[in-house]
Image (cartoon, helix red, strand yellow):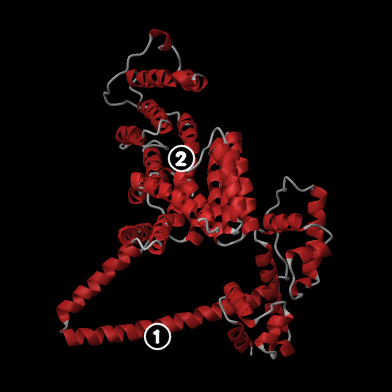
Amino acid sequence: MNRTLVLKYFFALICVYSLNCQTSLLAQKTQNYYVADSLKNYSFEELFNKQYSNENNNEIYIRAYLNKAKNKKDTLKIAHGYSQKASIELYKDSIQNALKYLDSIISFTKNKKYKDYPGYGYLWKGFILLNSGKYDDALENLLLAQKFANKRKNIKQLLSIKQNIGTLKFIWGNKDEAINNFLYVIENLNYPEVSESYRTLLKSKSYMFLTYGQIQKENFDSAYVYSDLCIKYLSKKDSIHGKNFSLELNAEIEYYKKNYSESLALLNKLAKLDSCFTNEFNYNYLYGSALNNLNRKEEAFTFYSKADSIYKASKDLMPDTRKVKEFFIKYYKEKNDTKNQLLFIDQLLVVDSLINVNTKTLNTKIKKEYDEPQLLAEKEKIINELSSKFSRNKLLLVILISLGIISLFAFYFYFKKQKHKFENLIKDTEETKITGKTINSSKIDDIPTEVIEQIKLKLADFEHNSLFTENNLTLAKLAKELETNSSYLSKTINHYKQKNFSSYITELRIDYCIKKMKNNDTFRKFSIKAIANEVGFNNTESFSKAFYSKTGLYPSNFIKTLK
């Protein structure tokens, strides 16, 4: 995962963000900087703009900006000045100095009622700590930022917080929940208060993680679609770095497609670029893994060693760190080097314990913002009351009775839920027809509009005539039948249906099956295997899983309920 690239691109966001705030209040006394007389007559906006037009001397203008704010006792402008100082420190990789300036922002504004502060300080502290691998501290600051963002109804901050919480979930928690976070951010960026620059940066990061999500699900066509969108938005800021990151993303996709030689070729291109903008751990881990899968273990050893050294120096723990340790254990076992084998076994145990702590702690902290504290308090209260009132045997009896009652309620609500699901399915089949709903109305840049429209019309006819029930239907076969090519068809389905080809066909088949079960007595008498074959599935297991995934019921239960 390319954490360094994301951090660098968000430097600019800090400055853009602070420029949008306009209110003024009195500040506490602070130390002034020496500022040349020639700069004292500039306005705040002029000083802010000059730091970007004079990159080699930008700190001079930031000092002048901050000094002017202190002389005027303008708390909000002081906060802006510190945010600019923080951005400079970040660009120089002086993380601790950047955090100190953000702490100053929080200190200056914590008792004020600004729309952006002090939430801004907590938000960017959380972001920086996350990208420095300090996940627990990052979450703590993000939750504080959320507290102020909710009070101020700050849409920009809430979207950024949701994205960063999604990042934490993606690394250590539930990837499906994380993907929902990123999709939510993308879908809610059209508020007037969200600037184009802010929108671009949030989209680029969201599409990056959606790419990783599709890679892990082995939906490689979708991964390339999201990768292209990620690069598109990164390139709006910097085409060179966008091109570099494109190589790294594509190298990762090819690696997980098991095209190891192609992955190495892309990584070699990346290494030769003058402005190589990549995460060193990720690069060496990916390179070593590709070599290892090509059985070039001695070469892989070199790259894994570099990745391991980077981890030891930074202590920035990632899930892939354990795979590096596993390689060395196996490598030294084959060499009969028990000393090093035991060394890396010990290191792996430490990494596993840290991963377990990260996963458990972060998941718990994220969820405890909701109803968990009340549930834990209620549980503790009941246990204490029972302990003081009953003996050990009586307490055991009460617990058993309680579990029995809870089980009865659980069964009751389970069957009630199943019935509700069934009734909704029946209602849906009465009110809707079988069709793959078009979600996205925007265009695809690299496909002619008339071609897209033709494909959409043919897909509508394909759905209307239930041609999706054909067994062994493939993307290539359907593309040929629709008189187009696989690439155009795949991109159109991904873009307009918001799902890959396999999910699209599966959903059509299940919807069709539900409707036919409801309306056709004879069809319901078929065996599950025959029904599966009738609607296009090649085996009973895949049909049952798909049916359950869509409806929450297995086909046999659905038929029994209908009868």
Q: Where is residue 519 in the image (x, y as percent from the top left)?
A: 72, 83
133 on left or right of 545? left
Q: Where is residue 343 in the image (x, y as percent from the top left)?
A: 30, 58
201 on left or right of 528? left
**Numbered disc 2: secondary structure:** helix
Q: Quadrant of residue 563?
A: bottom right
In the rendered view, tell whether residue 385 sits above or below residue 153. Answer: below
Residue extending farthest front: 336
Q: Residue 408 carries which label?
A: 1
Marks 2/1: CA–CA distance: 51 Å
What's the residue at 38%, 10% (across, down)?
36
What's the residue at 77%, 68% (across, down)?
463
Q: Nearer the viewer, residue 492 or 134?
A: 134
Q: How crowded is mark 2: few (under 14 residues within 10 Å), some or many (20 or more)?
A: some
Q: What kind of residue is marked 2?
A: Leu
Q: Name the residue under label 2.
A: 7
Q: Nearer the viewer, residue 486 or 365?
A: 486
Residue extending farthest top: 37
Q: Disc 2 vs disc 1: which is toward the camera? A: 2
Q: Can residue 190 be seen in this view?
A: no
Q: Residue 153 carries which label?
A: none
Q: How crowded is mark 1: few (under 14 residues within 10 Å), some or many (20 or more)?
A: few
Q: Nearer the viewer, residue 155 or 298?
A: 298
Q: Earlier in the sequence, mark 2 or mark 1?
A: 2
In the rendered view, tell whether residue 60 sits above or below residue 559. Answer: above
**Numbered disc 1: secondary structure:** helix
Q: What kind of residue is marked 1?
A: Leu
Q: Is residue 275 visible?
A: yes
